[in-house]
Image (cartoon, rainbow, N blue to C red):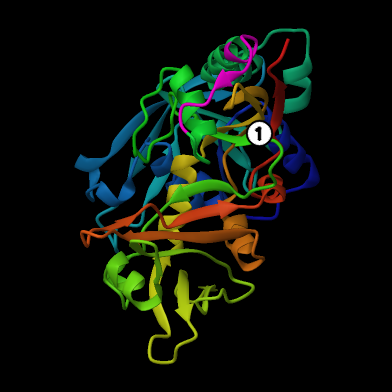
Amino acid sequence: MRKLSKSEENKIKLLTKNQVSLTLIEPTETGLKKSIMDATGSVRNFLKSEDIHDYELQGQGPKNKVLIPTIIHTGFKTIKSKASLYRPITKSGDPRIWFYSLRKIADANDIIAITYFDSGFQIFNLTKLDVETLINSSIQSPFKDLIIEINSTENEVAFELLVMLRKIANAGPIPSMVDADTSVGRTLETALGIDINSSKKPDYKGIELKSFRNKRANRKNLFAQVPDWKLSKFKSSAEILDAFGYERGADFKLYCTVSAITRNSQGLNLRIDNDVKQLIENSEKPEIGDFVVWTLEKLHSRLKEKHKETFWVEAESTEIGGREHFQYTLVEHTKKPITAQFDLLIDQGIITLDHLIKRNAEGRVREKGPLFKIKPRGIELLFPPSENYNLIA
């Protein structure tokens, strides 16, 4: 796709601000004449990540063609259309996409924006449509109505959760459930009626909750993810523990932080190999060397799954009657992490990894991680601009 103009970039920023998820495609002169466009990698990834369509599962030939209802927006009018998604029998069945009536609104090399809402595609010519004027106009239009509805739908659950958090916060400090670092999160989730479990899914209707004490500049948990054992030299957490663990009381454990910018006391560090797209953990012991790996694709997927939308909840910690209490005060609301930044932040030591492996007296090995954590200043680097809400009236 050609380089976007400054005007097109500004339109995308405005749409992103209004919670519109989209992808872009550039029809060529030949494509417009033949009513055919390649479904580029970015288009395929968008369709798959939004659970709209997966070309990898689609058979070749006309009988496997998929038609999806489409609305083409021209500003104050719309055109009812359809999208055709298919893989031809010829060659290797390279994915194709076409929007009927596209020629009515597009010239060659215009940039077409594709979003999905209300069980169908909603498309418009990003190059030609005056997006800012339509959104900010006092005059209603189908396009403005679409943006308002998308924005409202995207924020509905967030507003619902925010109301609940404000009710909890304005009731005053809450006694801690347990005497542990994790109690700030467990106490809030219990107050919200959320079951405490080890699910990898977000906590509240698609929104992840991350709570922390405001007087600590601690790293914040992003997610837990075990290595890809099939690609790794070591095949279990027990092997990692045996190689690098130490005695602590009745336990044999490995509790340590691993970074890409320095080796820890166990001689461990991280590095990213962009050629094979892997995160690799390495030991300075020559007989061990690289011992576990994660594919960057898997780490990016976990990041997007866990933090598609997140409330980072700040709490003031006070002691009342010999027991810790939490007064929840602020929320930072983030969405849609920038996965390319994840790799950079690992390289910079802003995202690190914690091993939490222990073998008890009975010989059982337990692994609470590996936990990927981020330093507080990294939040604004990993996510687009966030919204902040006060919880106390």
The residue carrying mark 1 is 16
Please identify the quarter of the rendering in which residue 104 is found: top right
Please identify the quarter of the rendering in which residue 357 is found: bottom left
Amino acid type of the residue that numbered disc 1 sits on in the rendered structure? Thr
Magenta stretch bounds? 168-178
Determine whether 168 is above or below 352 in the image: above
Q: Residue at x 46, y 30 (%)?
A: 186
276 relative position to 335: left or right:
left
State the image coordinates of residue 217 (x, y, percent, origin top left). 70, 47
Q: Along the line of sight, which residue is nearer the eye, 293 or 369?
A: 369
Q: Residue at x 51, y 61 (%)?
A: 353
State the image coordinates of residue 147 (x, y, percent, origin top left). 62, 20
271 in the magenta segment:
no
65 relative position to 357: left or right:
left
**Which image quadrant: the N terminus?**
bottom right
Check disc 1: other Cα within 10 Å, few if <14, some if 14-19, many if 20+: some
